[in-house]
Amino acid sequence: MSRQGPGFTPGEKPSSFGGVWKKIFQYMGRYRYAFYAAIAMSIVGTALSLIGPNKISDLTDVIKDGLAPGSTIDMEAVASIGTFLVMLYAVSTILLLVQNIIMSTITQKTAGRLRDDISEKVNKVPLRFFDKSSTGDLMSRVTNDADSMGQSMNQGLGMMISSLVLFLGSLVMMFVTNAIMAITAVLCTVIGLVLMVVMVKLSQKHFNRQQEYLGGINGHVSETYSSHVVVKAFGGEEEATEEFDEINNKLTRSAFLAQFISGTMMPITSFIGNLGYVMVCIVGAVLVIDGTATIGTIVAFMIYIRLFTQPLGQMAQALNSMQNVAAGAERVFGFLEEEELSSENPDNHIEKARGHVEFRDVHFGYVPGKEIIKGFSAEIMPGQKVAIVGPTGAGKTTIVNLLMRFYDVDSGSILIDGVPISSMSRENVHEQFCMVLQDAWLFEGSVKENIVYNREGITDEQVRNACNAVGLDRFIRSLPNGYDTVLGEMAELSAGQKQQMVIARAMIDDSPMLIFDEATSSVDTRTEKTIQESLDRLSNDRTSFVIAHRLSTIKNSDLILVMKDGNVIEQGDHDALMAKGGFYSDLYNSQFENAEES
């Protein structure tokens, strides 16, 4: 069940500063009571601190009156006012401190929840999303954008609340203290507010571009570094560097403009604040001369004008942080609002399939309007070893993707033991297969952990037997810590050895059906023979699907499906297809002709 907040509807992507923040507040819905409590504490704490200048005004007048000829300072009144001020500011400080703790907790929990939702979302989006998105850009959304949101929300949102309350509170107290001086201060401040609004609009587009280019540069770095050997082998360093420089320059320009424009708000507000001081001093002096104000009033008002202008600078800084939040949130929410896999209400569940698989008039295309599989039909009986062959682009791997329900068919149906896989949960379909793909995927961990991956109750003996079956046991036992050797730190594996480990992982899986997609493409002929023997043993009494370009490896298959342009054009065993002298025969003979010529 998704934990998305209220109003979080796919397809409703925010595109403005206000729209993004509305979405953020909706997302923070579960913390709204804590948020309201923080606002209340901020209001009360700030209000208490705003009472202080009035008392300081009284204290100033008491001292001034005591300094008059023939008078003495009323120390009892001074002590009373001073004690009151200390208690007042202490309570105000405690309330604002608690408010800050609450806001920090809310923002960090929101950022943590975002990361959790992103992690869940990754498992819900269709593979089509990954076809069009780079890994680096997705990682940037999970790490940079989410973390930036957490840090900036704490700095920006908490500061904005306290600054806004202080700004409005001091404005009220200024009018209560002296309306004429208050009007003078407000007129000076309006100029600053107008400039701040203009700066926010100018800088927001650059903050958005900054996050976009940051995702782009992460994607480029991830892609280039993961394929560094290929880049060097084909002399692509210069081109890769030029592309990096291009994206980096765009990122630098957008980051500079974003920071520069938003950074001008602080000096502007500082200038407006100083201008307000000067004007209030002039007007205040005139009022004292006229006798309509006291020195204490001027002292109190100077404190209020500081409290009034100080939040402008803080709000400028908070807006800067909030713009950063909005830019990151737009990318994060954009991902969270991506179309998800169709909801599943499985009508059927298979504990362990017998292995009877049917394809009935299957049509499919990765892109709408561009069909790859065109009316594919086939029936595979339990325990059969089925080879799928054909030229590149014929649709071999696509058939496996559809069989595993990585993609749903556009029309037609696929059945396991007579049950349409569309009526089963994707997880239940995946449980029926173990896979060995062309790319040998290993993670950071020990040899044993990589082989046992996601399986419980696997014994050391089972692991050794699987590795021995693929010819890897002797090599592993020669490693410093044997099966407990951590890959990458104390052991570097060749491409063939990685593939052997992946096959060993498949061998300890008790799934009723097997899929091998070019499983021996990275090994030498001798190792291929060893692996082929182990695969034959593994395939006993199991329905297995083998995709292979080396046709010599599938001669003993029970059924060979020959594909071309998304259709099965021939099917049968090796001898029958060779005797037919058709497309398969030409494909098979051409491989040996090429081998002899080489």
Image (cartoon, helix red, strand yellow):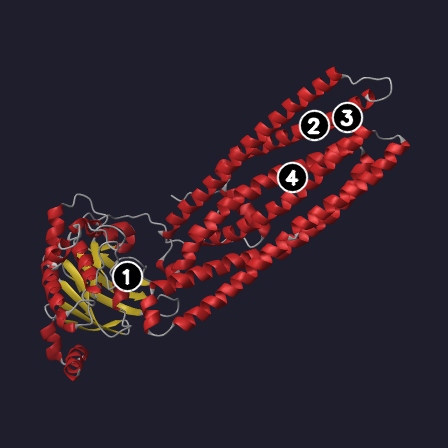
Residue 457 is situated, as x and y percent measured from the top left of the image, at 17, 43
Give the residue drawn at x 18%, y 63%: 545
* Element marked by disc 4: helix
Give the residue drawn at x 66%, y 27%: 48
* Element marked by disc 3: helix
Please identify the quadrant where the N terminus is shown: top left
Residue in the foreground of this view, choosing between 549 and 223: 223
Label pair 1/3, CB-CB below 8 angstroms: no
Dot 2 corresponds to which residue? 52
Cα separation between marks 1 and 2? 71 Å
User: Where on the picture, by quarter, is residue 374?
Assistant: bottom left
Give the residue drawn at x 32%, y 70%: 230
Dot 1 corresponds to which residue? 401
- Of the numbered discs 2 and 4, the one sitting upstream in the chain is 2
Q: Which amino acid does the dot numbered 4 rest on?
A: Leu
Q: Which amino acid does the dot numbered 1 rest on?
A: Asn
List the single residue furthest toward the top. Answer: 76
Label pair 4/1, CB-CB below 8 angstroms: no
Residue in the foreground of this view, choosing between 479 and 256: 479
Count of all numbered marks drawn on residues in the image:
4
Cα separation between marks 3 and 2? 12 Å
Cα separation between marks 3 and 4? 28 Å
Mark identifier at residue 164: 4
Mark identifier at residue 60: 3
